[in-house]
Amino acid sequence: MARRTKIHVGLEIGTSKTCMVVGEVKADSAVKILGIGETKSAGVRKGEIFDYSQARACLKDALAKAEDASDVEIGSVFLAVTGAHIRGINNRGTFRLPDGEPVVSPDHVEEARTIAREVHIPQDHVYLHPIIRNYWLDGFEQSTAPVGLYGKTVEADFHVVHGIGTRIQNSIKLVREMPLEVDDIVFSPIATAQMALDREHRQRGALVIDIGGGTTDYALYLGGAITASGCIPVGGDHITNDIHLVTGLPFSKAESLKVNEGDASADPLHSVGNAKLTDERGFAEVEVSRAVLNEVIRQRLEETLRLVKQRLPADSVEAIGAGIFLTGGTSLMRGFSELAFEIFGRDIYRPELPEISGIQANFKDPRYATSIGLIRYAQILETERAEPPGLIGKIGSLFWPFGR
């Protein structure tokens, strides 16, 4: 019997936009984007809901637009979540085989996995992802579970993501009131990485930095496995606010000046003269020194990138062979790639996925990286769930119920 296509929906409730992407996974595993529903966010600050009614209205609007654009009645979504409260940590579980049992069994591996996943977290936190990184047998690294091999000690190395339960539940409640079901909950940078990186990138070492309106999310992969992930509550809106404070311009004009005239590079040629905004008649309405404007932008972005770098494991940047991959709306800032290269000293890229078809003008836009990454995540998770346990596991994560 021919394999049927499957439709998945990714939802990102961000600081700047609420975005819903409908994707069709075909029988040959190709992905086609059927439609995107997007609306400007309200009631969300630094990736978290602070005005429930406003956020609900935005989600309802995005849902209607996504259904109209895709001609699909949406019943469930893969939900991206972020916020400074979400943290990723690595933990290794060690299990010594009992006397008289020299061969590793599935039960032995599961014991090591259980120990690795049982990370102590704050009382108000819940587990989001337990992601297997690799296994070890008597100190020797294994890419898959070492079932059937002789050994004495089995170790499982996990990357565990956790966050404050009530804040995550608020996002779930918002979705369920549409009413929609939540297929799975995904930490935003993990979803973004599915769009930005392929297997070779992960193996060679790659860092994804997704800088949006209110947050900067990151995920680091080394040796094929996730090594670090997190969220810094700073984004493009903070740059706009800095411009507003320095120049006294209204927030809307500061935003226009940032987008249309700003440059984050240190190139002095881009800081000559004045940056201007014109009114409807073409007359100069606002003039600001380019040197001042660019310095404000650069200082905030440099601080943000250095915060990301500080949170990475020691010496990990030197191990990044594939490069730094920039996504998110703020990554479109002129000169941002040059600044990122200055901070990290690694090749800088803006990822694309050529095997995704559909709305050509949209899916290559870095603002949609997380939402489209959710479709890829859903596709891989569905494949993993269909495989015998332990054969894939490098990406997958099942949402751990609240209260566990």
Image (spheres, helix red, strand yellow):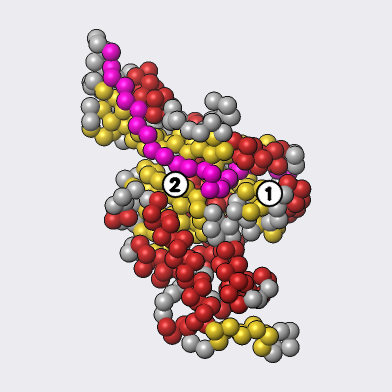
Q: Amino acid at mark 2?
A: Ser
Instruction: Please say if 164 is above or below 350.
Output: above
Q: Is residue 235 left or right of residue 65?
A: left
| Label 2–label 1 contact, CB within 8 A | no
Residue drawn at 24 percent across, 11 percent down:
99
Q: Would you name the residue on which mark 1 appears?
A: 50
Q: Residues within 10 Å of mark 1 (few under 14, many from 20)?
A: some
Q: Is residue 12 left or right of residue 146?
A: right
The C terminus - image quarter: top right
Q: Residues within 10 Å of mark 2 (few under 14, many from 20)?
A: many
Q: Is residue 5 left or right of residue 137?
A: right
Residue 120 rendering spot, x and y as whole percentages:
45, 30
Q: Is residue 179 magenta?
A: no
Q: Amino acid at mark 1?
A: Phe
Q: Is residue 59 left or right of residue 275?
A: right
Residue 315 versus residue 29: which sits nearer the camera? 315
Instruction: Please say if 23 is above or below 343.
Output: above
Is there any visible trace of residue 263 in the rendered image? no
Residue drawn at 75 percent across, 39 percent down:
177
Q: Which residues are magenta?
A: 73-98
Predominant secondary structure in magenta? Answer: strand
Q: How far, Cα to Cα, is label 2 from label 1?
A: 24 Å
Q: Is residue 91 magenta?
A: yes
